[in-house]
Image (cartoon, grey):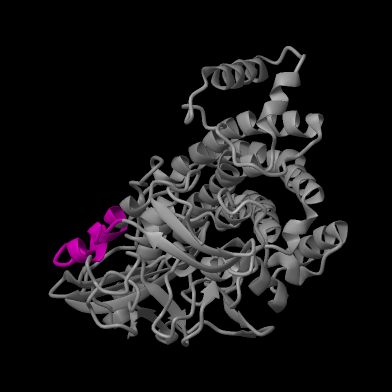
Amino acid sequence: MKINLGPLTRIEGHLNVETTVENNKIVDAQCMGEMFRGFEVFLQGRNPLDAQQITQRICGVCPYAHAIASSYAQERAYNLKVPPNGRIMHNLIQGANHLYDYLLQFYQLAALDFVDVTSILQYKGKDADLLTLKNWVQAELASGKAYPAAPFLPRLSGKYVNNADLNIGALKHYIESMEIQKKANEAAAIFGGKFPHSTSIFPGGCTQNAKIDLIASYQSLINEVRNFYHNKYIPDVLAIAKAFPEYWNIGASKGGFLSYGLLPLSPEQNSKKVFSSGVLTDGEISPVNFELITEDVKHAMYSSPSGLKVRDSTLTPSPKKSGAYSWIKAPRYQGHMVEVGSAARILVDYHQGNNATVKQLVQKFAAQAGIPPSKINSVLGRYLSRAICGAVIADFLLDESERIDLKGPTIADIKIPSSGEGFGATEASRGALLHYIRIKDQKIDRYECVVPTTWNASPRDDNDQPGAMESALIGTNVKDPEDQIEAIRIVHSFDPCIACAVH
């Protein structure tokens, strides 16, 4: 029996997932991106310095990652020498954006898959926020509407946390996290100009000057965010994991893992990073080679050639193409499906031993959960990975902000060459992000973005291999084929951003 789970809520963008269920097991799955946008088309012929501004509009949640990937690509195309302050400010902006995004994903988008919001009806305290929430839930339950306006109802049928104190505590943190997200965005905007869509990120650095009062304000905000991570976010993730230990064994993708690395430690193009880059397949790490990335379109709604390398990719929409079911392409690394995102970032770094803190935190939390590190490839593993990433990033940002040279330049002098090309790779919060630019006559001749959810929510490729999310769904047992809360929890663990995927 085929079941359409869409439209999926509590994600960014428009995604439908169709599963085929036999004997209460998902035997097939298709992820369907349902719109076309065409950023690569309307970038052609523009001034290259438009790119880091326009590509931010791919996504209002992670715009800074697009600006920075575009800036990295242009730096290579222009052969820029970036001053240390420029790279530091990029890090401070992007790192704060990651901290915001992890909180948003867990509390507003995913936690309600596990937390029983109706527990708020038992609340007898005087906290104003919780009382407002209680009244809201009561009103929605009393309305009798099939689809009430609140973000909490209706719910899918299934098991939820049965500890009232844990539920109410998580709901309190749901509300508090919004203020903490605001502080992370304020921190990013100190050097980024504003959020979303930074006005100060450029190839070669940042247009904001280095000032001691800006640094102090940034540190104060990030310290508050850091404290929330350690005192509330991480304990909440571990509490959910304790209540649902079966989800260490649900939602594993069936391929490798790819990370481009995050937060470079120096301005050099091949600098070491806080999180290292690499491809993890069959327990072995290899360096990333952009020339091994291709994009298949057999099952995507494009008539342009399939299997092209990133620098050769083209885009010809074909909405009525036979056999196609998604506007998302199917990127592959050396022909293989890989997962990108928080779990990939942690697993790639853990296997390389690049960051001692990452290794220590993985081993600590894996021991607490009674699981091997390989179980990071799971629903719970993706949530734990975001918590680990956040803890590492927050500590790094406080140290990184101390390295700003108040007398040094923050941006390189930019001169656009007549011709050139460059790849720019970074890690958006959702995973590996690659931009490619080719310049001809000082204009953009070709631009290509290979975006995290393009990897994870890809359709089948030319060899009919499913994408990471499809493969994670296949083989999952579901209690209620009509609701499939298990499938929804798997999809939410990837934190898909369809606006990015169909850019």
Secondary structure mostly seen in the magenta stretch: helix
Percent coordinates x, y for residue 72 in the rendering: 39, 67
Percent coordinates x, y for residue 166 in the rendering: 78, 34
Percent coordinates x, y for residue 195 in the rendering: 41, 41
Percent coordinates x, y for residue 412 in the rendering: 35, 62
Highlighted range, magenta: 35-54
Looking at the picture, tell me which residue is in the foreground, 317 or 275: 317
Any part of residue 344 in sight: yes
Residue 40, magenta (yes or no): yes
Residue 373, magenta (yes or no): no
Q: Quadrant of residue 170?
A: top right
In the figure, 367 relative to 103: above or below? below
Numbered marks: total: 0
In the figure, 175 relative to 495: above or below? above
Which residue occupies 53% across, 65% down?
A: 469
Looking at the picture, tell me which residue is in the foreground, 496 or 94: 496
Looking at the picture, tell me which residue is in the foreground, 266 or 447: 447
Looking at the picture, tell me which residue is in the foreground, 297 or 129: 297
Which residue occupies 37% across, 47% down?
A: 198
